[in-house]
Image (cartoon, helix red, strand yellow):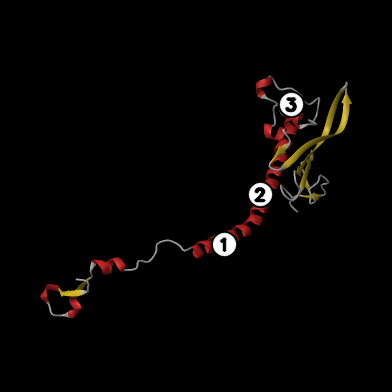
Amino acid sequence: MDREIFRPDDGGANPMNCRYFFSRERRARRWNAPNGFTLMELLIVIAIILILMLMAIPTVGHLKKAANETSAINSMQVITKAELSYSNTYPMNGYACTLTAMGGDPNSGAPSATSAQILQPDLVSGYKSGYIFAVNCKEKVTVNGTDRFNGYTVTAVPQTVGKTGDRGFCESDSGMITFDPAGGSSCTQQLGQ
């Protein structure tokens, strides 16, 4: 029985109702379609994914810089609030001239003018989200041998201009934030214009 044979269903004479039975040899020789991808299809899919990634990389870098700049502006506002709190707590000193004066470890003892424990540790270090922060005092007045600072400036500049941020930011005791489009601390343009 190596050949195809047909048997009528239910003894009927209609050839359209016939079932075909194949020999075992014939079934073994039948070709099945392969499952999965060919190498060429796989390479095309990989090439498309690489092209999409290359298109997305500049966008991701731009988003990272924008997030760093937003974080820098928010951090400057936190530093400004800490400066106001410092000047209210230590009116004889005025404003703090360093970030470390507003920082400090709460486990090291009571707050003081040199360790006010107002500012969070990540800002006290001066580095956060790709920006470098600094505080500079101005308008120094000496009263009874104690220096009192009546003004301050907070600056935030990118660690690497063009990579971690494009603009430098400044804020003074007036509360107005300005920026330097070149990434430095020569802030001349007002933020939000």
Query: Which numbered marker is on residue 47?
Result: 1
Q: Position of residue 60 (x, y in %)?
A: 64, 53
Q: Position of residue 80 (x, y in %)?
A: 74, 37
Q: Is residue 170 above or below residue 10?
A: above
Q: Earlier in the sequence, mark 2 or mark 3?
A: 2
Q: Quadrant of the C terminus?
A: bottom right
**Which residue position is annotated with label 2?**
64
SS of the residue under disc 2:
helix
**Which residue position is annotated with label 3?**
89
Q: Earlier in the sequence, mark 3 or mark 1?
A: 1
Q: Tell me which residue sits at (81%, 44%) in the image.
A: 185
Tell me if label 1 and label 2 are in contact, CB under 8 Å: no
In this rendering, position of residue 24 left or right of residue 95 = left
Q: Is residue 190 visible?
A: yes
In this rendering, position of residue 22 left or right of residue 74 = left
Looking at the rendered image, the disc whose residue lies closer to the viewer, 3 or 1, is: 1
Most foreground residue, 107 or 59: 59
Q: Quadrant of the N terminus?
A: bottom left
Residue type of the residue flagged with mark 2: Lys
Residue type of the residue flagged with mark 1: Ala
Distance between mark 2 and mark 3 Cα atoms: 37 Å
Q: Earlier in the sequence, mark 1 or mark 2?
A: 1
SS of the residue under disc 1:
helix
Residue type of the residue flagged with mark 3: Thr
Q: Position of residue 39 (x, y in %)?
A: 49, 62
Q: Position of residue 63 (x, y in %)?
A: 65, 52
Distance between mark 1 and mark 2 Cα atoms: 26 Å
